[in-house]
Amino acid sequence: MSSVSVKNIVKTYGEVRAVDDVSFEVQKGELFGLIGPDGAGKTSLFRILTTLLLADSGTATVKGLDVVKDYRAIRNKVGYMPGRFSLYQDLTIEENLTFFATVFGTTIAENYDLIKDIYEQIRPFNNRRAGKLSGGMKQKLALCCALIHKPEVLFLDEPTTGVDVVSRKEFWEMLGQLKKQGITMVVSTPYMDEATLCDRIALIQSGKILSIDTPDAIIQNFPKPLFAAKSNHIYELLKDLRKEPGVENCYAFGEYLHLTLRSPEADAMSVMKMAGRHSGEGFEVKMVTPTIEDCFIRLMEKI
Amino acid sequence: MKAIICKGLTKQFGDFKAVDSISFDVEQGEIFGFLGANGAGKTTAMRILCGLSYPTAGEATVAGFDVYRQQEKIKKNIGYMSQKFSLYDNLTLLENIEFYGGVYGVSRADIRTRSRELVSTLGLEKEAGKLVAGLPLGWKQKLAFSVAIFHRPRIVFLDEPTGGVDPVTRRQFWDMIYEAAAAGITVFVTTHYMDEAEYCNRISVMVDGRVEALDTPARLKQQFSTDSMDEVFYQLARGAKRSAD
């Protein structure tokens, strides 16, 4: 049985189809990622799955329980860390944690093992009010509060948005630890580089799923060779290559430009010829393995 | 003339040095990436450079104006845009443009011609009379950037302009940044996307109130013996003692 099952869910707000016929399954113990920009429909999906919002049509179950009929039972089985910090700002770390434990009819002591590693990082500040905590500490407290009743499925809505690289890395390490304890997790993020840290991912844009698979399989399905090129005048190179009829798509990608060519036989030499006036100007071209971001761009542009 | 000059710029709150003696220059027309961990002091430094807050020590000029004595002149000569606040949702596109143009003292005639140009460059003719609230985020951010440089400032400050934006729009946004820089506008930008750090001419990395590194992306990678900006940032920021929003 799947831990989470979503079938043909639709949610509209006025004329906007926020979630447009979305279906997916999450297996027990899986770390499943919803990868997409703001406005993709990620938060609506989370709210539907945590029984906080009703879909217009379609069905969804969590642990075999229906999100509409069995909403009370689901609430005991899931943990939810919303995108916006939503703990009590006026309560201390300890008070917040005790509060959430009590609401779920448990105690901090009872499930201490689960939160131990995370909680001990913020415990020295136990008497500090949540409103006075740093971003990284708030995030850790929110995760502890979402875990305190030992949920079977944990929903994390953009836990790393606006957080710097160091804290993002730490957070994903924490998720890795939780996965070892058998918790099923659904996590959303706009950062494409975090996709590879998930077991399986759904790429989502404007309420529609573009692709669902393991990150490796999505990358392997990239249909054409991908080239990376650079020169000393990278913006000029970008403009020049975009004018070339043989170039299918070309965009900036960090230090390099990434491009695909129309002809399937084209190789790095063809790119070099197209780059023409850039040769000798620090020009370099090589074939590269696509990243999830390359795949997302390609799926978005429906080439 | 340099767009920005900072010498020992400091902002102290009680005994806490939010910005701790930072020094750097930004050239006219340069794309300057201003990076740092959460709580490193970027926002405080940016507020000083935008003429919104006084330093407690050190010197700085922005577009040639002094951050202590000429705050109002600074404000007239810069543009500002952030992810969090950019446009008024309950005004139409054209009303937003008119409002910002008016605040910055652009003449009525100029507002009229330039806004027509702007709307057509962005391909938003059909949406011009609609409320901004209904626009997709990516379009809003592109429009917000255009509005921020509508009065043709010397420098534009962009505070995480592409947060949460899809990868295609994020790149279109950077095309606009390149164009602005090519037209001579200095771009001072913060971001959490390390690939965007690569699009900057030079970047600085702040850690605990200080500028710990400043160079071109290529030279920084060389200095830290790595091929990714992510790793450069990680090596610099992991030792940070401060963290905040």
Image (cartoon, helix red, strand yellow):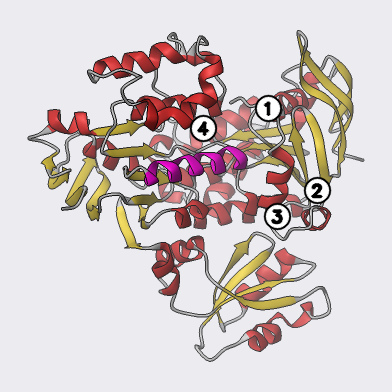
Determine if the magenta segment contains residue A167. Answer: yes
Q: Within the magenta stretch, is there residue A179?
A: yes
- With B118 as the anchor, is A46 left or right in this view? left
Q: Spatial distance from mark 2 to mark 1, Cα to Cα?
A: 22 Å
Of the numbered discs 3 and 2, the one sitting upstream in the chain is 2
Q: Is residue A180 above or below residue A145?
A: below
Name the residue carrying label 4.
B87
Residue found at x 19% / y 47%:
A10
Determine which residue is flagged by label 3: B198
Residue B181 in the figure: left or right of residue A257? right
Residue shown at 60% from the left, 48% from the top: B193
Asked if both marks, 2 and 4, belong to the same chain, the answer given is yes
Callout 2 amino acid: Gly
Of the two numbered discs 2 and 4 on the same chain, state the one appearing first in sequence. 2
Marks 3/2 same chain:
yes
Cα separation between marks 2 and 4? 25 Å
For badge 1, the amino acid type reads Thr
Of the image marks 2 and 1, the number of the one nearer the N terminus: 2
| Residue carrying label 2 | B29
| Proximity of marks 2 and 1: CB atoms separated by less than 8 Å | no
Give the Cα separation between the discs numbered 3 and 1.
Answer: 21 Å
The residue nearer to you, when weighing B73 against B82, is B82
Cα distance in 3D space between marks 3 and 2 = 17 Å
Q: Chain of mark 3?
A: B
Q: Which residues are magenta?
A: A164-180
| Closer-to-camera residue (A134/B141) | A134
Please indicate whether residue B39 sits to the left or right of residue A51 in the image: right
